[in-house]
């Protein structure tokens, strides 16, 4: 890939820029896109905006050569961020970290709630379903923590006032995992955005785990799971599990939108889950904070306006 594809991809991208002659370029600096972008963009003479949603070395790699490549990509990612005309990152901790590394300011850019989502939240009332459905949307990136959550939930299922299920939404199947129990776990598969939103609204809680250790600080501290935004849009209180320095824990300190569990102790985890899931009116308890968090941190219209202003600045730089 580095020997043959990278030079070809760089030439192809330069030809595309010459053919389209864009006013501005918006790039998502991620994975294998990083090296050709880093080679072509700084000398392209076209204003560009860089978005970073994950650090290149955020996730555990499989071998030393891959680790070294990820570290090289991380350096190139920072160089792209520094040389861009405008830039955004997925959360405030990442913005602060990039400012410290590059000296450059940026804005926050991530998934958000649209006006119809805010309208739904303003009209939402407590549901009293016969089953406590806990939603999990997307890929499981911290499987040890997920398995810990499942075991704790299995211990308290019979204590809860109603039956409980975990509803999995996403491309990946976990049916073969040793912790999966088809008697109270359901794989719903990949759903289009509108259908996913409708199904999430039938659930009672969302679950969003991060690492309980700080072994992967690039992920724990500087990533923001999009599932968290999807849960807020559906009006779901969020069960958060992770390290105290994780981005979600920091967010939970400012906006208590659900129980935030910072310990991997099985007894404590079971106890806190039992208390949360026995709550008779979760929306009454967490709804005001969900709405406050959504308006303050996840307003899609406001973020879009800021992004479009960045594009205007990039176009002005091109002219």
Image (tube, helix red, strand yellow):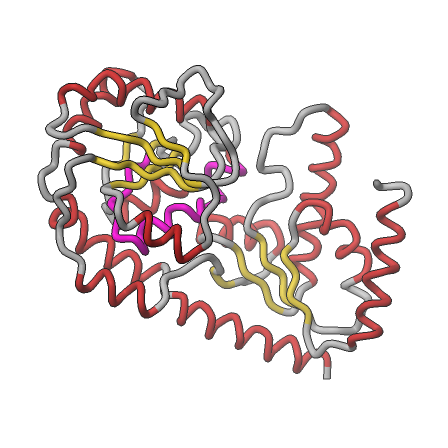
Q: Position of residue 183 (x, y in %)?
A: 31, 22
**Image position of 40 with respect to 267: above or below:** below
Relative depth, front residue between 200 and 23? 200
Q: Is residue 313 above or below residue 42?
A: below
Q: Residue 233 lies in magenta, yes or no? A: yes
Question: How many numbered marks have been drawn onto this rendered protein structure?
Answer: 0
| Vertical relation: 215 (above or below) 55 | above
Give the quarter of the figure containing the C terminus: bottom right
The image position of residue 313, as x and y in percent, is 61, 78
> Where does residue 212 sit, x and y in percent of width and height?
40, 27
Res 262 → quadrant: top left
**Residue at image point 30% right, 59% down:** 294
Residue at the (70%, 30%) spot, across then down: 67
Q: Is residue 37 left or right of residue 3?
A: left
Vertical placement of 203 versus 304: above or below?
A: above
Magenta-colored span? 218-240
- Taking depth in this image into account, of 146 and 94 the one nearest to the observer is 146
Give the camera-side residue of 90 and 253: 90
The N terminus appears in which quarter of the rendering?
Answer: top right
* Residue at (46, 53) in percent of width and height: 192
Is residue 209 toward the left or the right of residue 55 in the image? left
Q: Tell me where residue 88 appears, x and y as whole percent.
A: 54, 60
Q: Is residue 154 left or right of residue 4?
A: left
């Amino acid at each position: 890939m580095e020997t043959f594809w990278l030079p070809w991809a760089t030439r192809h991208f330069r030809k595309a820029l010459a053919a389209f002659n864009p006013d501005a370029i918006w790039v998502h600096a991620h994975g294998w896109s990083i090296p050709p972008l880093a080679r072509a963009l700084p000398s392209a003479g076209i204003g560009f905006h860089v978005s970073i949603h994950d650090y290149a070395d955020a996730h555990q790699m499989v071998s030393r050569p891959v680790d070294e490549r990820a570290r090289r990509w991380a350096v190139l990612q920072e160089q792209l961020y520094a040389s861009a005309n405008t830039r955004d990152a997925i959360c405030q901790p990442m913005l602060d970290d990039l400012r410290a590394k590059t000296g450059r300011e940026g804005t926050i850019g991530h998934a958000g709630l649209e006006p119809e989502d805010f309208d739904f939240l303003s009209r939402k009332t407590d549901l009293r379903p016969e089953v406590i459905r806990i939603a999990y949307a997307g890929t499981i990136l911290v499987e040890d923590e997920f398995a810990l959550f499942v075991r704790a939930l299995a211990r308290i299922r019979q204590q809860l006032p109603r039956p409980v299920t975990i509803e999995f939404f996403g491309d990946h199947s976990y049916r073969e995992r040793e912790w999966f129990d088809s008697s109270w776990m359901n794989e719903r598969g990949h759903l289009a955005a509108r259908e996913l939103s409708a199904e999430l609204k039938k659930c009672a809680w969302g679950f969003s785990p991060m690492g309980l250790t700080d072994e992967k600080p690039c992920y724990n501290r500087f990533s923001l799971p999009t599932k968290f935004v999807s849960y807020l849009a559906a009006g779901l209180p969020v069960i958060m599990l992770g390290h105290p320095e994780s981005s979600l824990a920091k967010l939970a300190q400012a906006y208590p939108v659900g129980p935030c569990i910072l310990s991997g102790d099985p007894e404590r985890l079971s106890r806190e889950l039992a208390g949360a899931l026995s709550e008779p009116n979760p929306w009454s308890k967490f709804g005001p904070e969900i709405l406050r968090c959504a308006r303050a941190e996840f307003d899609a219209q406001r973020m879009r306006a800021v992004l479009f202003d960045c594009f205007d600045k990039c176009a002005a730089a091109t002219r």
